[in-house]
Amino acid sequence: MKRFSVLCAAFVIAAAAVALADQGPTYTGPMSASEKQFVAGIQADLMKRFPTAADAVRAGYVRYTNEDATGAISYANMQWQSADVLHPSQLWYDKNGQLLGADFSVQTDSNTRPAKFGVNPGRWVEFDDHVHWVGHDANGQATYDNYVMADKFKAAGGDPAHPTAADLVRMHKVDKTSDVATVFDMPRIWDLIVWVRPNPSGAFAEKNPLVKP
């Protein structure tokens, strides 16, 4: 999926200079009672509040990816500290704009996986700092899946924590500032990926056999 997990896994392949490799899950076993309670709670809540992509946009989430091979299109709210179960940092939808799942995140410099929400810490994955932007092509159509790793952004004189369209022009990523609809930093985080739509493979699985691109 081009939601945060697989997108950043691709970053590791494309960015060998990254100092800390993104860390995958260390636990993929059956759900505990507390995990089942967590999943049931967010399924009921998020399906009510954000059933469609339009609901996410109205709440301040911004689309930043194309549809991926498993059918997910990701939206982020740029709030990387999910203090509680009501505030996922990302939501993802299918091509018809129906809710698929959510990411919860903790911005951190720690190498210790979070112990939150009653979820096994081994389910959390770590992603390194990088900058995303949504652009426009020559026909005015939105372009997604644009990124640059933080170390390269810094080397070009930019501040990943406060990226600008002018930085992207200077880096020759875009021709002019008006080609950038939005640009934002995804800092180093621990991220928890959860299917909201029922998934026979489990709520924390990477893929859902019921979702077809």
Image (spheres, rainbow, N blue to C red):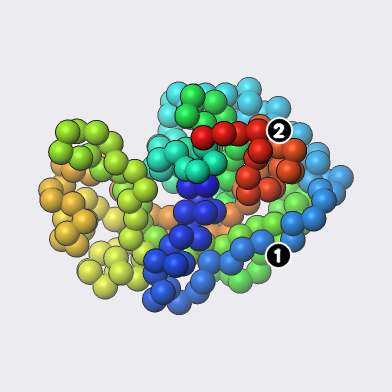
Q: Nearer the viewer, residue 23 or 202?
A: 202
Q: Please give left or right for residue 199 compared with residue 46 in the image.
A: right
Give SS at disc 1. loop
The residue sitting at 43% across, 55% down in the picture is 186
Residue located beneath label 1 in the image: 26
Q: Position of residue 15 (x, y in %)?
A: 39, 69
Few, some or many residues within 10 Å of mark 1 (<14, 14–19, 20+)? few
Few, some or many residues within 10 Å of mark 2 (<14, 14–19, 20+)? some
- Residue furthest toward the right? 33
Q: Position of residue 139 (x, y in %)?
A: 17, 33
Residue type of the residue flagged with mark 2: Pro
Give residue 198's mark.
2
Q: Nearer the viewer, residue 109 or 62?
A: 62
Q: Please give left or right for residue 72 compared with residue 15 in the image.
A: right
**Real-space Cα separation, disc 1 to disc 2, in angstroms:** 23 Å
Q: Nearer the viewer, residue 164 or 180?
A: 180
Give residue 76's mark.
none
Residue type of the residue flagged with mark 1: Thr
